[in-house]
Amino acid sequence: MRALFPVVTLLVAIFMFMSGSGALPAVLGVRLDHAGYATPLIGLVGTSYFVGLTVGSVVILRLVGRVGHIRAFAVFVSLFSASALAYSIVQAIPLWIVLRFVDGFCVAGVFVCLESWLNDQAETERRGGTLAFYMMALYGGQALSQLLLSVEMGNPRLPFVIASLILSLTVIPVALTRMVAPATEDQQPFALRRLYAASPLGLVGAMATGLMLGAFYAMAAIHAQRIGMSNLAIASLIASVIAGGVILQWPLGRLSDRFDRRMVIVICFALTALICGAMTLVTDPGIFTFLGVLFGGFAFALYPLCVAHTNDHLAANERTGATGGLILTYSAGAAVGPLASALAMTVAGPGGLYLFIGAVAALAFAFGIWRQFVALPVPGEEQHSFQILPRTTPMIAALDPELPADDDPEERRV
């Protein structure tokens, strides 16, 4: 608990932010599908968000350095709150594509501000505990936000109004904090060629995970609506997928510490492909939600497993840059996933979403099997210990407790 007290303000802020923003992809997808828009256009809205997130992750740190963390955080959250209200006023695909790009850019800004602050405030010996609390706040808020799908009560604008209200209140704990803002240090991610040379499976696995989860977040609610699930059932489905992802990451990570990590990654891709195959055939909400828990468990574990596998091939002082490169690779895949899966749904019907995700997982599985034959595994005693990491920004990598710490945390503060 001692890891919690110095950063409780930041944890409250990320919980509130995710509670207000986490359901918007599902709410927007359901609205657009109900209005009869073509599936590829809906996928383009999802793609726009991840493009904004990717661009923001690259350029925002300089902006934060100019105006300071508190001002930047207030700007990003306020802009996101205004965007949430704008959805309730005008339903037009061109405007919503622009707004989703702005949303992604703002989310990147919020994560950069909070994660760099967490890195600065967390004591060296408690970085692991700080990261655990951060993950609980982030995914807990995201799961809770899915309730916005079922709160219309005859007023279609109500979910957007509630989201905007929660987002607006998110500014308060950070604006009133007495914590000193951290210094901003630009972290340069590895180039793709260097990442692939260090760990081919790590890079390909991160890209494949981005394709799969980008498609899921953008299009899962649409698929569920088309197979007859109610808004409450859709909310339960997405929350269950998130819960499954949180529950299984730790045991799978510990398993990968004891055995060849590549084999654990390959098995997760194989099981994800098989589960997606079953999800294309099932329409019963209860069974489908159970499969969703399993899907989340194995699919969510893939990104931190790929990070850990890449770190097995790097020196400690290279891991932050490599994690930054993997996050950007994941984001690039997530930007392609919604549009590609939307095209698959156009061709194959609603089940095309999980056919696409399963096909990506199967291809990644085949690549992983090939790597088993052409490269030797890293000896168990040389493996970097698994650490659960969210797929947010490169800043979060510095909370890995096995990374070398700065000599004096006070020297990092302005």
Image: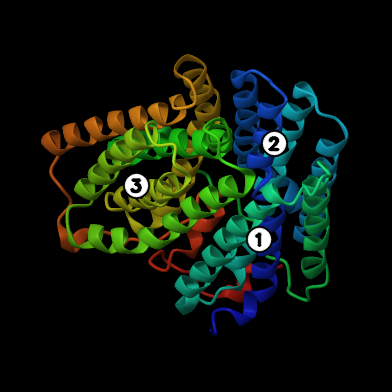
Which residue occupies the extreme top position in the image? 347
Which residue occupies the extreme bottom position in the image? 2
- Give the CA distance from mark 2 to mark 1: 26 Å
Identify whether 133 is placed above or below 279.
Answer: below
Crowding around mark 3 (Cα neighbors within 10 Å: few <14, some 14 to 19, many 20+) is many
- Give the CA distance from mark 2 to mark 3: 31 Å
Q: Quadrant of residue 201?
A: top left
- Residue 75 vs residue 134: left or right? right
Circle 3: residue type? Cys
Which element is circle 1 on? helix
The tag on residue 28 is 2
The tag on residue 306 is 3
Q: Nearer the viewer, mark 2 or mark 1?
A: 2
Q: Position of residue 169 (x, y in %)?
A: 82, 62
Q: Position of residue 44 (x, y in %)?
A: 63, 24
Residue 387 in sight in this render: no
Q: Position of residue 263 (x, y in %)?
A: 19, 47
* Viewer-side residue, 413 vs 204: 204
